[in-house]
Structures are given as C-alpha cells and as structure tokens.
Image (cartoon, rainbow, N blue to C red):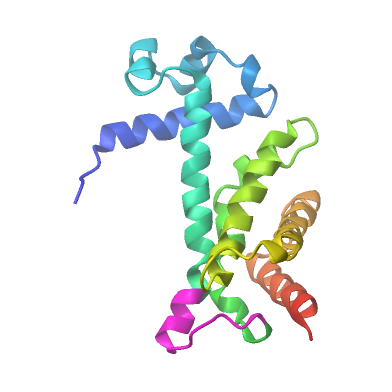
Amino acid sequence: MKVKDLRVVKTKKAIYQALTKLLKDKLLTDINVSELCREASINRGTFYFHYEEVGDVFKEFFEEVIVDLEESYKEPYKYISALQVQTLDYKNIDPKTVRIFHHVKKYEDFYRIILSDNVSTTYYYMFFDAIRSNFIEDSKIGEYDESKKFVYSFMTNAIIGLIIEWYRTNFEESVDDMNIHLVETLNVITRS
C-alpha cells in the first residue's frame, strides 16, 4: 500500500484550487506558471518539482475528478452486488444508491468552469467520453457493441443534460432531488 505524503497532497490541493480559481476568468492556455504559483502560495521550484507546465496540473486534476466520477457512477453496482443480481436494472434503481450528483456537488467549482459558456468544448468532450466509457463498460458482456454507440451517446447526454440543467439553476436542487430526476430519466429512456 502506497502511503501519501500529506505535504504533497496539501500542495497539490492548493495548486488545484488556484487553477480552478484562475480558470473562472481565463482560458487554460492563458494561465502561466508564475500566476498559478502566486495564487497557490507556492514557489516555482515546488511547482516544477511536481509538474512541467500548467496543462499538466489540469490534466492531473481532471483525471482525479474522472476517477471520482467513475467511482460515483459505479456506486449502485455495489448495492446490486450485495443483492447478488447480475445487472443493473435502470427501471428499479434506488435513487438513494445514485452518487453522480454527490460527485458533481463535491467538485462544483470544477463543473461551473467546464459547463460555462466561455470555455472550450474540449472539456465537455473529455467529460462526455468519461461518462460514455462507463455506459460501454457496464453494458459489455463480451466485446464492444458498435451497433449501440448511439444509445451510449444518448444516455451519456441524458446524464450531462441533467447536470447542465442543475448548473443553469445554480445547483439549487438538492442532490437527492437530482438523483430522483436521474432515475426518472433513465426509466423513460429504458421503457420498453
């Protein structure tokens, strides 16, 4: 088991927070190492000990967010595993087992940035691909089913659409209410 150095964790958290703050007003390509270091209250040596450039910080932070998203997405599967069921039945999913919106709330500042009108669609597509890969993974019995690529994309956009609508309402609804909206949406989509 790898033990994390708390100083490194703290430093990276400060850098992530600084980057998130700067991204509210600037594009990633317009942020330089000096201003990121100033905002994070670290020196350039500390920055270069961990990263080569500002883009590396975003990439690492984005990967951390996506790992948390994937864990959140898979939470209902832990519940069905306990029940010894083979597949997740979207029609009978319990909203209390849904964790995607807990994840979004945890990283709310990040989502405010990637969903805002003034950022590149690159972030959206990275987010889209991360969610879509989960749909592909949990629907796979054998090989990837190319014929369902549009279904995977549709379901991905359904989830992202809920997140965007939540963002547009300034995240006013509770996480529990959003879980119910997701389950209702999945029920409509998967109705036969």
Q: Is residue 92 magenta?
A: no
Say whether residue 168 is visible: yes
Quarter-wise, where is residue 44 in the image?
top left
Quarter-wise, where is residue 52 in the image?
top left
Residue 184 drawn above or below residue 105: below
Say whether residue 112 is visible: no
Residue 14 drawn above or below residue 68: above
Where does the magenta region start and end?
77-90
Q: Which residue is at 54% across, 64% downward?
A: 137
Left/right placement of residue 177 relative to residue 43 reads right
Q: Which residue is at 54% across, 76% downward?
A: 97
Q: Quadrant of the C terminus?
A: bottom right
Left/right placement of residue 135 relative to residue 79 reads right
Q: Which residue is at 27% across, 32% downward?
A: 7
Residue 26 drawn above or below residue 132: above
Q: Which residue is at 78% across, 83% downward?
A: 191
Residue 131 x, y percent position in the rendering: 61, 56
Between 101 and 156, the one nearer to me in the picture: 156
Between 99 and 18, the one nearer to me in the picture: 99
Quarter-wise, where is residue 155 in the image?
bottom right
Residue 100 x, y percent position in the rendering: 59, 62
